[in-house]
Amino acid sequence: MVSLNRRRLIVICRLAPLLAMTVLTACAKPYIQPSPGEHTAAQLTASYALMEDGYRLPLSQWPAVPQTRAVVLALHGLNDYSIAFDNLGRYLSDHGITVIAYDQRGFGTTAGHGLWHGSERLSGDLVTMTRLLREHYSDTPLYVLGESMGGAVVLSSLASTSLDIDGSVLVAPAVWARQTMPYYQRAALWLAAHTFPDKRLTGKNLDITPSDNIDMLRALHQDDRVIKATRVDVLYGISNLMDKALERAGDVSGNMLFLYGSHDDIIPALPTCELYGNLTNAENNELTAILYQDGYHMLTRDLQAHVVLQDIATWIDESALQINTNNSLRHYCATQAKTE
């Protein structure tokens, strides 16, 4: 009898963690901030864009001098906000290109700051913004530029919607999809998102260098509008976004500039090269790709940013211009494939 009870106790002890985890996962799930639920006409103002559901997206603008000959709509990366494009905006405005950026939902000074609002809403905001800008600049070339997470939003939107634009620019696009992660990372992400979705992670002990511009990184650290600790369910949400961006890249068409730095510690080479291959094989896609040997993840703010900004301005001027370094990313990816 004692032996039988002991066996039962052992079984219960072994099953307890599993049962506890089952209970936890049944109670917790990744949170998605709901829409305001209003129904209104989308519109642009000097300081914000009003979406159809009543949500306000704060704007940063750099008007062209002396007049606008092209417009760039810029989307920032995870935890950042529209002022991320101050360097880009000031440079392009001096070259006759107006830059307009907005704080994406959950970032900067938006409502629901620090929460995930859903990939579909981020893409929907981009669709609405391009429509509003096309109405305002009906006879002016319009481009969208996405940096990191913003690049994933651009890709997923282009794959599922026909945007009325003249081209797109991807700056170190976030495409670290689950299919390119080791199984244990995928499992850990799912488990964390379904047990403690509201836990905040800082990445403090990660050995990564997002940029070689240390002064810029210090300024970001002092900026209260930049999120320093990310909720687990936000990481889960952006993983879903990256999944779609990489998976649907073959459906993207149009003129595109693709920029990546060989020192990028945020988005690994493997998913980046897979994205490059998908875009190269896509029908009706005019792709110009540039690898910056000294570039990091934050290309438009790195110490060599002037080179990147000049390439962007030149490409916009010439659209599908074949820049001399066009094949460098192809060679880089071929080299990476050999080392896998």
Image (cartoon, rainbow, N blue to C red):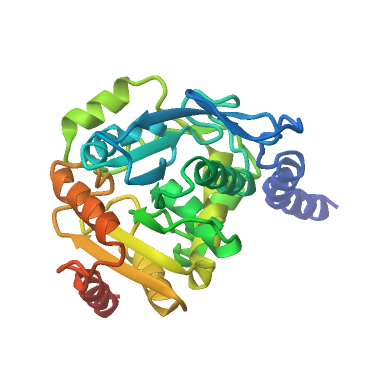
At x 29% / y 32%, what residue is drawn?
86
Q: Is residue 260 visible?
A: no
- In the depicted view, which residue is nearer to us: 28 or 9? 28
At x 76% / y 55%, what residue is drawn?
7
Residue 184 higher or lower than 328, as above or below: above
Could you say where residue 291 lies in the image, as x and y percent from the top left?
21, 62
333 with respect to 28 (left or right): left
Q: Is residue 140 visible?
A: yes
At x 32% / y 42%, what residue is drawn?
206
Residue 283 higher or lower than 129, as above or below: below
Q: How many marks?
A: 0
Residue 148 higher or lower than 35, as above or below: below
Residue furthest to the right: 1
- In the depicted view, which residue is nearer to us: 135 or 19? 135
228 with respect to 96 (left or right): right
Instruction: Locate the C terminus by quadrant.
Output: bottom left
Could you say where residue 299 lies in the image, as x and y percent from the top left?
24, 47
